[in-house]
């Protein structure tokens, strides 16, 4: 049982890790993500969020790797789980993948539009910008298919903006390709040429080989219709060299049409022969149809040939279904036998493990019982002595409780006294500083040659003692007083920071006199928040001039001490 529990925990941890790794590489290496997801053992046993994430990521990986989807049953698991969950990224991704698969399966157009619209509604709350860009691209393609070209351009531009910010060259090149096709449909040749140049600039940085093949194929087809044989052949050949096997027949068919249009009969016949031997019957039928569409011009011949193809396809599909059913039956039997053998082995190992577990459990219980029996005898002997100690401890606990209550009251009183002492010490410090400055100011009054300092000192006394200050009348006198007291402090402040306004200077002068925000607010008849806003504004202006992060009080103290000589 313990072994099964441990194995289950390891499996759960491994599955969660695999899902996270697959999601991380979904847009960069979708084929690797698909391999990781398909390697998860027993996906049918997953439940809750793990089951929804598995269905979502597997559907997206198959769509990104061009694996045809037969229905939307798998992605519906994720849609139903996340539609009422508070996870905008997963909900938006689920609606986006659902719409893409419905579109691939030629589903109901109304359901496709609704899925993409539901995905678009999640965009304001989504953080995964890669998924957002793909939602915009898909809605743009849907509008392009419906003939709403201007709306399609708008959505393509949204996606292109996000991919440019994310430096996602693969997605950006895909946006360029969509806009290239759209402008081509609108006969906007200048825009087509511009987007073609942009795609070729990004081509060497792309990791998606299939996308590079698409770029060259579309540019080659454009040159073919512009009757530029050289560039058309060059790009189509490059597209064929880069294309995956599933896409190469269409490129070869386009190249054969190019040779046929320019009467390169030998090259065209060689490609047609190569295409006619293609192993996949469905692809070969598509090739024959495209070849004969150009050869069978009369409508009667075309109709007869189509009837022949329908009959041939019907006969082939019946034979194909029979063979597939037989192979599927054999495969299912082999898988069932392997699964039964694996289950039998698991059960056998579980039973053996359970037997060993019971044996060791019984041994442990027996040894534990003997040990506890010995301890019980010892404890019984100590019980009486412990009862006596208990009575003594209860009496002592009552005494400790009384002592603790007394100590708590004393600690509260001590804390209150400390707070009062701190306040009184602050007041003493400010009074001593004020007395010292008044003594210096008094000495300077006796030695001053002009009357400006006397008036400034009177303003200072009125400001400090009475809290009275008239900015327009007293500012100049206070400036002269501070200049003389701190050896040019006010002049240095005005020269170094010329953008300061009169109210800014008043606040700087009062801070130089050690007034706090509440005192300044009371003197200037404003609230404390206004003083704080002025201080932040002044600090920001000074920092922009001095290119540093020094606080306002530190800067003012520095200006007071700069070039200051000792007073007599």
Image (cartoon, helix red, strand yellow):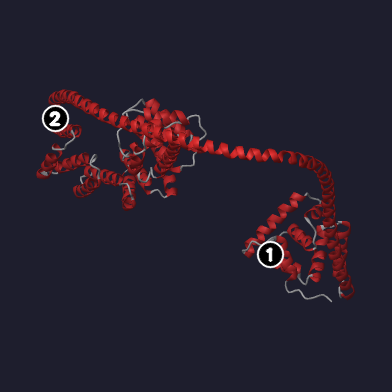
**x, y (%) of residue 557?**
74, 66
Above or below, 424 relative to 444 = above
**x, y (%) of residue 196?**
31, 48
Horizontal side of residue 213 vs 136, given as left or right: left
The secondary element bearing badge 2 is classed as loop
Horizontal side of residue 78 vs 291, given as left or right: right
Above or below, 158 relative to 544 = above
Q: Residue, x 73% and y 74% (percent of image)?
A: 563
Q: How many marks?
A: 2
In the rendered image, the quadrant that contains the N terminus is top left
Who is closer to the viewer here, 400 or 180? 400
Q: Earlier in the sequence, mark 1 or mark 2?
A: 2
Whether residues under marks 1 and 2 lie with C-beta atoms below 8 angstroms apart, the answer is: no
Q: Quadrant of residue 348?
A: top left
> What residue sits right under mark 2 in the picture?
297
Who is closer to the viewer here, 331 or 87? 331
**x, y (%) of residue 558?**
72, 67
**x, y (%) of residue 405?**
83, 44
Who is closer to the viewer here, 331 or 391? 391
Which dot marks residue 102? none
In the rendered image, the quadrant that contains the C terminus is bottom right
The reply to whether residue 298 is visible in this rendering is yes
Distance from label 1 to label 2 (Cα)?
88 Å
Q: Quadrant of residue 309?
A: top left
Which dot marks residue 497? 1
- How crowded is the residue under tag 1: few (<14 C-alpha within 10 Å), some, or many (20+)? some
Horizontal side of residue 348 vs 506, given as left or right: left
Q: Residue, x 14% and y 30% (percent of image)?
A: 297
The secondary element bearing badge 1 is classed as loop
Residue extending furthest left?
266
- How crowded is the residue under tag 2: few (<14 C-alpha within 10 Å), some, or many (20+)? few
The reply to whether residue 146 is visible in this rendering is no
């Amino acid at each position: 049982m313990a072994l099964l529990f441990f194995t289950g925990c390891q499996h759960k941890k491994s599955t969660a890790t695999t899902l996270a790794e697959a999601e991380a590489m979904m847009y960069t290496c979708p084929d690797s993500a698909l391999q990781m997801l398909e390697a998860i053992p027993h996906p049918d046993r997953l439940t809750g969020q793990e089951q929804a994430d598995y269905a979502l990521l597997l559907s997206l990986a198959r769509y990104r790797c061009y694996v045809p989807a037969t229905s939307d049953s798998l992605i519906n698991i994720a849609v139903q789980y996340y539609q009422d969950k508070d996870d905008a990224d997963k909900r938006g991704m689920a609606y986006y993948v659902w719409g893409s698969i419905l579109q691939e399966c030629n589903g109901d157009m109304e359901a496709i539009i609704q899925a993409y619209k539901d995905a678009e509604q999640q965009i304001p709350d989504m953080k995964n910008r890669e998924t957002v860009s793909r939602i915009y691209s898909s809605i743009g393609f849907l509008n392009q298919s419906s003939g709403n070209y201007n709306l399609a351009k708008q959505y393509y531009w949204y996606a292109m903006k996000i991919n440019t910010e994310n430096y996602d060259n693969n997605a950006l090149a895909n946006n360029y390709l969509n806009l290239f096709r759209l402008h081509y449909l609108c006969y906007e040749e200048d825009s087509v040429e511009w987007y073609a140049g942009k795609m070729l600039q990004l081509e060497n940085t792309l990791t998606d080989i299939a996308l590079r093949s698409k770029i060259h194929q579309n540019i080659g087809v454009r040159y073919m219709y512009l009757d530029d044989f050289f560039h058309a052949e060059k790009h189509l050949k490059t597209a064929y060299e880069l294309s995956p096997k599933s896409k190469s027949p269409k490129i070869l068919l386009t190249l054969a049409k190019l040779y046929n249009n320019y009467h390169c009969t030998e090259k065209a016949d060689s490609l047609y022969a190569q295409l006619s031997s293609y192993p996949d019957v469905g692809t070969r039928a598509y090739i024959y149809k495209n070849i004969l569409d150009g050869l069978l011009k009369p409508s009667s011949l075309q109709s007869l040939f189509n009837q022949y193809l329908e009959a041939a396809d019907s006969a082939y599909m019946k034979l194909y279904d029979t063979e597939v059913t037989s192979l599927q039956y054999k495969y299912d039997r082999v898988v069932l036998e392997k699964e039964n053998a694996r289950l039998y082995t698991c059960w056998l190992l579980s039973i053996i493990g359970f037997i060993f577990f019971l044996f060791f459990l019984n041994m442990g219980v027996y040894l534990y019982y003997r040990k506890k029996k010995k301890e019980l005898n010892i404890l019984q002997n100590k019980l009486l002595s412990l009862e006596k100690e208990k009575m003594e401890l209860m009496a002592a606990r009552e005494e400790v409780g009384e002592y603790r209550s007394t100590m708590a009251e004393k600690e509260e009183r001590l804390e209150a006294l400390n707070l009062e002492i701190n306040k009184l010490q602050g007041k003493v410090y400010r009074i001593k500083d004020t007395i010292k400055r008044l003594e210096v100011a008094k000495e300077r009054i006796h030695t001053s040659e002009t009357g400006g300092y006397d008036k400034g000192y009177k303003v200072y006394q009125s400001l400090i003692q009475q809290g009275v200050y008239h900015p327009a009348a007293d500012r100049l006198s206070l400036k002269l007083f501070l200049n003389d007291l701190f050896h040019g402090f006010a002049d240095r402040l005005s020269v170094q920071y010329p953008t300061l306004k009169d109210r800014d200077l008043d606040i700087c002068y009062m801070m130089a006199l050690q007034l706090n925000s509440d005192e300044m607010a009371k003197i200037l008849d404003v609230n404390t928040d206004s003083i704080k806003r002025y201080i932040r504004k002044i600090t920001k202006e000074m920092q922009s001039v001095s290119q540093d992060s020094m606080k306002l009080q530190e800067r003012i103290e520095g200006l007071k001490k700069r070039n200051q000589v000792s007073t007599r």
